[in-house]
C-alpha cells in the first residue's frame, strides 16, 4: 500500500462564472484565475462541519442523534506579491466579491484541466481581506475569509 502525497498535487482556481457546478467545463476552469502558486503550503482551509440532531424522546434512556446541516469554514492564506499578476488574489478577492472556488486534488499541479477529473466547486462570497502580522523571515501574507453561499459540489466531474 502506498500513501498519497499532496505536495504539488493540488490546483486552486477562482472562477467568476460556472453554469453547472456539478460538471464545470474545462473552458470555464481555464478561464479562471489560477491562485495555486500564491497560496501558502498550509493556506487552503476548507473545513466541513456537520450539525447533530437530537432524535431522543421523552421515553429514551439513551441520547440518540442523526446528521443535520452541513456547513463549511473556508479561509485561504495568500502570499502578497510585488507585481500586479503576483498580487492578483489581493486585488481580486475583496469584500463582497462572489464567484466559485474550484479545487482539484491528487493530480499533478502542472496537469491541465481535463474531462473526467474530479473537483470540488464552492459558490463563494469573500469577506474582508485580513493582512497578516509581519514576522521575521516570512513573506508578507493576507487571509481571505470566504462564505459558502449555497451547497457546494464536493465531488464534481469536469466536463
Image (cartoon, rainbow, N blue to C red):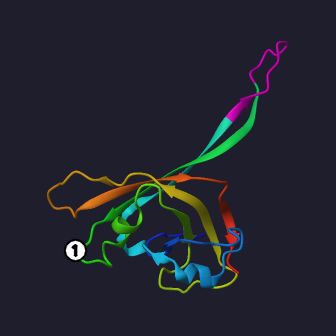
Q: Nearer the viewer, residue 98 or 58?
A: 98
Residue 84, image quadrant: bottom left
Relative to 36, residue 123 above or below: above
Residue 61, percent from left and from top: 79, 14
Q: Which residue is mark 1?
A: 82
Residue 25, percent from left and from top: 66, 80
Relative to 64, residue 105 above or below: below
Magenta span contains residue 74: no
Residue visible at 22% across and 64% down in the picture: 139
Residue 103, percent from left and from top: 55, 69
Looking at the rendered image, the quarter that the N terminus falls into is: bottom right
Q: Is residue 159 left or right of residue 144?
A: right
Residue 107, percent from left and from top: 55, 78
Q: Nearer the viewer, residue 136 or 134?
A: 134
Which stretch is magenta? Answer: 52-63
Q: Is residue 88 left or right of residue 32?
A: left
Q: Is residue 46 left or right of residue 77?
A: right
Looking at the rendered image, the quarter that the C terminus falls into is: bottom right
Residue visible at 85% across and 13% down in the picture: 59
- Magenta stretch, main secondary structure, is loop
SS for tag 1?
A: loop
Q: Nearer the viewer, residue 46 or 87?
A: 87
Magenta span contains residue 57: yes
Residue lying farthest to the right in this orientation? 59
Amino acid at each position: 500500500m502506498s500513501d498519497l502525497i499532496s505536495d504539488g498535487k493540488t490546483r486552486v482556481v477562482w472562477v467568476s462564472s460556472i453554469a453547472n457546478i456539478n460538471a464545470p467545463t474545462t473552458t470555464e476552469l481555464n478561464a479562471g484565475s489560477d491562485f495555486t502558486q500564491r497560496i501558502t503550503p498550509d493556506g487552503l482551509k476548507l473545513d466541513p462541519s456537520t450539525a447533530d440532531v437530537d432524535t431522543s424522546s421523552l421515553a429514551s434512556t439513551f441520547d440518540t442523534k442523526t446528521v443535520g446541516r452541513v456547513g463549511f469554514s473556508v479561509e485561504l492564506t495568500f502570499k502578497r506579491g510585488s507585481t500586479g499578476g503576483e498580487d492578483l488574489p489581493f486585488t481580486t478577492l475583496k469584500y463582497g466579491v462572489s464567484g466559485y472556488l474550484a479545487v482539484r486534488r491528487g493530480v499533478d499541479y502542472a496537469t491541465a484541466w481535463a474531462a473526467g477529473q474530479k473537483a470540488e466547486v464552492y459558490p463563494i462570497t469573500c469577506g474582508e481581506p485580513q493582512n497578516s502580522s509581519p514576522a521575521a523571515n516570512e513573506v508578507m501574507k493576507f487571509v481571505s475569509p470566504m462564505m459558502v453561499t449555497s451547497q457546494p459540489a464536493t465531488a464534481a466531474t469536469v466536463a
